[in-house]
Amino acid sequence: MATTNDLKNGMVLKLDGGELWSVVEFQHVKPGKGGAFVRTKLKNILSGKVVDKTFNAGVKVDVANVDKREMQFSYLDGEEFVFMDTETYDMVNVSRGTVGSAAGYLLENALATIAFNEGSPLYVDLPAAVELTVSHTEPGLQGDRSTGGTKPATLETGAEIKVPLFITTGEKVKVDTRTGDYLGRA
């Protein structure tokens, strides 16, 4: 248990019957009249929904214990991704729903940070950018290269992104894992 005076960005709170919310930002407000309060912006860890919530200053809040561990993606077992803890070598199965959009950028042996609460995985964080090979893209037309246009490309993981016209099949590209944008050649 902590009070609203102890809030920090990134802290995870257990509110509304056990839902986990991450503190995105907070602000202590002392108005001229009345008691002080804390205005927060909270993000639901599972759904990603962001809400504004106001607490009275000094109110007790339940802080959740979130353990973040670096793990290595081993293989896909049906609808579950199997990760290995890089320190203890324990294997952990993570459902496709928990992995979410990160599934399109995961290769075998890739490192990811997985957050756990009471032993169950909450979400998977990838590095900001990854290098992947283009498995298929249509060839660009001669003379089209100066327009700055884009075309669809399928990556080795099966994810589709937009790449510039000069990229060909077999090239390695750098991809932003948060937005799915092409960042450049690798």
Image (tube, helix red, strand yellow):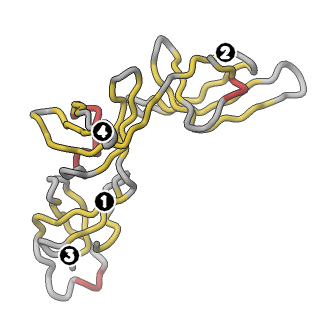
Q: How many marks?
A: 4
**How far separated are the C-alphas under marks 4 and 1?**
20 Å
Q: Amino acid at mark 2?
A: Lys
* Residue depicted at 15% across the width and 42% down the height: 75
Picture layout, residue 151 above or below residue 64: below
Mark 3 belongs to which amino acid? Ile
* Secondary element type, mark 1: strand
The x and y percentages for residue 165 are: 21, 76
Q: Are marks 2 and 4 in contact (CB under 8 Å)?
A: no
Going from the N terminus, do you reach mark 1 or mark 2 first? 2
**CA–CA distance between discs 3 and 2?**
55 Å
Give the residue at mark 2.
60
Q: What residue appears at the point 11 percent right and 76 percent down from the top-left corner?
A: 139
- Circle 1: residue type: Val
Residue density around tag 4, few if under 14, some if 14–19, many if 20 or more, within 10 Å: some
Say which residue label 4 marks: 85
In this view, the mark in front (3 or 2): 2
- Point out the tag, 4 or 3, that comes first from the N-terminus: 4
Give coordinates of residue 38: x percent, y percent. 71, 27
Q: Residue at x 24, y 60 (%)?
A: 161
The alpha-carbon separation of the residues under discs 3 and 1 comes to: 17 Å
Q: Which residue is mark 1?
A: 130
In space, the residues marked 2 and 4 are separated at their CA atoms by 34 Å
* CB-based contact (under 8 Å), mark 1 and mark 2: no
Residue 167 numbered tag: 3
Q: State the separation of the CA atoms marked 1 and 2.
A: 41 Å
Q: Return the x and y of residue 22 as percentages of the image width and height.
A: 52, 31
Q: Please tell me how crowded label 2 is: few (under 14), some (14-19), or many (20+) other residues with Cα within 10 Å.
A: some
- Mark nearer the N terminus (3 vs 2): 2
Which quadrant is the N terminus positioned in?
A: top right
Q: Quadrant of the C terminus?
A: bottom left
